[in-house]
Structure formats: structure tokens, C-alpha cells
Image (cartoon, rainbow, N blue to C red):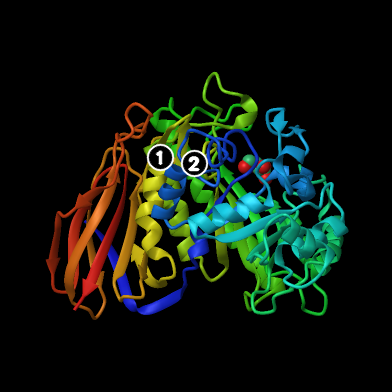
Amino acid sequence: MAKLYVNPKVKKGHLNPELQGHFSEHLGRCIYEGIYVGENSDIPNVNGMRTDVVEALKEIHVPVLRWPGGCFADEYHWKDGIGPKEGRKKMINTHWGGVVEDNSFGTHEFMELCRQVGCKTYINGNVGSGTVQEMSEWVEYMTFEGVSPMADLRKKNGHEEAWTVDYFGVGNENWGCGGNMRPEYYGDLYRRYQTYIRNYDREKPVYKIACGANAGDYHWTDKVLETTFDHGRGFMNGLSLHYYTVPGDWGKKGSALEFDEKEYYRTLKATLKMEELIKRHGAIMDQYDPEKKIGMVIDEWGTWYDVEPGTNPGFLYQQNTMRDALVAGINLNLFNKNCDRVKMANIAQMVNVLQSVLLTDGKRMVKTPTWYAFHMYQVHQDAELVESFVETREVGQEEENKVPNLTESVSQSQDGKLHLTLTNLSLDEAEDIESIFADSQVKAVKGTVLTGKMQAHNTFDEPDQVHEEAFSAITVKEDRISFTIPACSVLHLEVELA
Ligand code: AHR
């Protein structure tokens, strides 16, 4: 029997709701069809946003949404997406699928989406092919209340009040699709561009995010920080990190649905690398910023497989199985455990692209196993991380791809309840667990579980194959509870102490 030790009196940090953030790009069917169908669509919508999708996003309390990219961000010119729709420029989305981008979803529509979902806004600016003036004017357009050319233009376009921009990214992947820059060069550009992101609303300053590394590129992190640090000021609030779970290699990534047990464990092993990346990039950040004032913002994470057969390779559409739910559970536990440095994380991407929480097909929508993982973990939003430790053993089939059978994190929400989220990565072995709560007596416990075969998934014809179910087989005895976590599962337990 594995022991899970929980020490409710020891708090390890605050869990920003933004650790469960999302990302939506002008890519494939994410924005168009997945979210925005236009006011005249026969798909039920409010101001063009499909109602089924908005309602499902509200159910998981999406805390923040990043937009418009991604690689698209460094090709996006925001003025193309404002004003009367019939006059908006049409262009080719050269990066993603070569389709026509009609700019019918722009700044006003993004802000309306965030209003409907009830989430914070994260805008990603264009450094790769945009000017300082263009970026600076965008911030003025969105956030300035007074009289100015850009504020007046916003008002002329129908929005009297300024919006709040909570987060602003200065470029995306500028080491690659965002301009193929060297870190020293990007660092200098960052210093310059960020100067003109004005805080027009002093009570709600914009949280500025510099473009960080790709996976294990520690040189980038070091050099960007070295270049941007000036007398102890980094000019930034956050530094990003991108890391995708790819079971194979970039040439042949692997199928979302057709995989064997070895590939399943390989996927989870690749996911667990996130911990090493957080620690090693974090150690570099500690050298410049020992007080951890700069947040690590993991604004792209998730599984990346080969696209579904027969779909546009530039659309990155993939199905989503129990394996993806475990990837989500592992990562969300890791973000919680590292909340001293990690301040935001955004899964890529919200609808119809890569590891999505929702898939759509015309009028139909389906919640993926990943949606359920987010649904179970939302209890951690705004909670305090509690000290915890679980005993694990290695499982898996290939020596080099063994993984610990369990991952976990524990938090205390503002109503005093404890929330334990666990993943059992083993494909065939349930695990008996005894959880001990130091110096405490357990009063009540309940939970929910998500489990199934590794390839189990929801389709438009069978949307309910994988879903969360009540979990009540829990024995309570004084300061401890015992239960059996099924193989290949995500579990949430809510514990009330006396
Ligand atoms: O999420 C898909 C793409 O992955 C993004 O556009 C880019 O930033 C990353 O390479």
C-alpha cells in the first residue's frame, strides 16, 4: 500500500488560477468554427461566439486566454482586424494551412469572447514583423481611457470604455517562427519594445512577458536575462517557456489514437520532462532573480501528434484520449508543485488544435478527456498549495521509459477543504493508497474519477465514452483515509478535516 503524506499546516505557495490557462490561435479550426461562427450562423451564438463552447469553457472556469498566436502573432497586424467587417483585409494565413484569413475575429471579438467566458486577457504582440509603434498603438487602443488617436479610433469602432489587458507577450518564439533571432538580439529588442507598453491604468498594470526558451534551450534563458537585466531590473514580469509532449520525433510524432503500450509510457515519460525543464530554467532565473519576482509562464504545453488522417496538415487537428487526460493531470500537478516560480501555464490549444479541451464538427461539440481533467483540477484555482508526498514505484515496459506510477498535488481552498488530485499512470495496476493527514482528523471525504482504456475517447457519435464519475469507495479512520486508485486514471478527492 502506497502512503500519501499530507501536512495541512504547511503551505507552500499560492496557486494562481492562471496555472490552468488556455491558448487560442488563428490556426485551423480553433478560432473560426471552434469559437467564432459569426452573428449570422445557424449555430447558436451570442455576438458570434458559439454558445455551446462558451458554456463548456465556463464550466471549467477558464482563468485566462492567450491570443492571437503562436506563430500567427508575429505575422498579425492588429489594425487589419478592427472596424466594419466588410472592410477588413483578407489575407492568406501562410503559416497555418494557407487558408484565407478574413480578419472577422479581431481585437473587439477577442475582448467580447473573454467577457463571455469571464476570463483574463493575454495578448501576444508582434515583434517579428511588426514595429514598436504598431505594438505601442495596440496597447493604447485597448487600454487608454482618455483622448488620443487610438482611444478615439476604438470609440469610433463602437467601444467607448477601455478594456483591461492583463498580460502582454512581447513576441512569440522569436528564436524560431518569430524572427529566428539570437537571444542577445531579442533581449535588446525586448528592452526597446517593452518600453512603449504603457500602463495607462496604474491600478491594473500590464504584466509584461518576454519570449522564453524552447524546451531545453538553457542558453536562451541565460542570455535573454543577461541582456535584459539592468541594475537588477529585468524590464519584465514574466518569461515564457514552451514545451510540447511529442511521443516520437518531429518527423513522425505518433498517432493520437493508434498507439501501443510502449508509446503510451513514452508519452508520459516525455511529459514528465516538464519537471526537469522547470527546475533547470528556474535555476537560471534564480541567478538573476533570487526573489522570484519574475514568473515562469509556460504559455504553450500539451501533446502534439500527427494530424488526424485526411485533415489539413496545417490545421493540427488531433483526437484526445485518456492518455491526454493523464498528460494534463501530470502537468497540472507539476505546475502546482512549482508554484513558487510558475505563475501561468496555457494549454495548446483550446478548441480543435493539438491537445484541446473541446472538439467541434459543424453544429456538434464534444468534451475531451482533457476537458474532464481540467474540470476536476479547477478546485485548485486560487487555493494554497499544501505540503505532500506520495510513495511511488516505477512502471512501464522499456527500461529507458519507466515512469513513477503516481503523481499528485494537494491544496487547501478558501473554504478550508483539502483537494487531492492524483494520476495513476499504470496501465494495468490499480494502487491501494493510504493518505495520512498530519495532526488532523478527517471528517468527510468525497471524490470523482476519470478512467478508461488508454485509447478511450469521445466522438461526435459517442460523446460520453469518457466522463467523470463519482468516487466513493473511501474508508475514513481518524487521521487517514484509504482508497484504491484505478489503473490509467485521474482522481480528485475533497477532504474535510474536523
Ligand atoms: O501551438 C502551435 C504552435 O506551436 C504555435 O503557433 C507556436 O508558438 C508553437 O511552435
Q: Position of residue 334 (x, y in %)?
A: 47, 58
Instruction: Specify whether tag 2 is near ligand 1 (CB below 8 Å).
Output: no
Q: Quarter of the image holding residue 166?
A: bottom right
Residue drawn 64% across and 66% down? 164
Query: Which secondary structure, mark 2?
Result: loop
Q: Residue 241: x percent and y percent?
A: 64, 55
Mark 2 sits on what residue? 356
Could you tell me how far apart the alpha carbons at marks 2 and 1 are, in whole angstroms? 7 Å
The residue labelled by disc 1 is 368
Tell which of 66 and 328 is nearer to you: 66
Write the residue at 56% across / 40% down.
39
Point out the image quarter for the N terminus: bottom left
For residue 291, above or below residue 299: below
| Contact? badges 2 and 1 (CB < 8 Å) | yes
Q: Is residue 38 left or right of residue 451?
A: right
Nearer to me, 455 or 159: 159
- Quick check: which quadrant has ligand 1? top right
**Rendered view: 345 above or below 198:** above
Q: Is the C terminus in the top left, top right, bottom left or bottom right quadrant?
A: bottom left
Extreme residue in the top direction: 310
Return the x and y of residue 355 as percentages of the image width and height: 50, 40
Q: Give the amino acid type for the residue marked by disc 1 in the picture.
A: Thr
The disc labelled 2 sits on which kind of residue? Ser
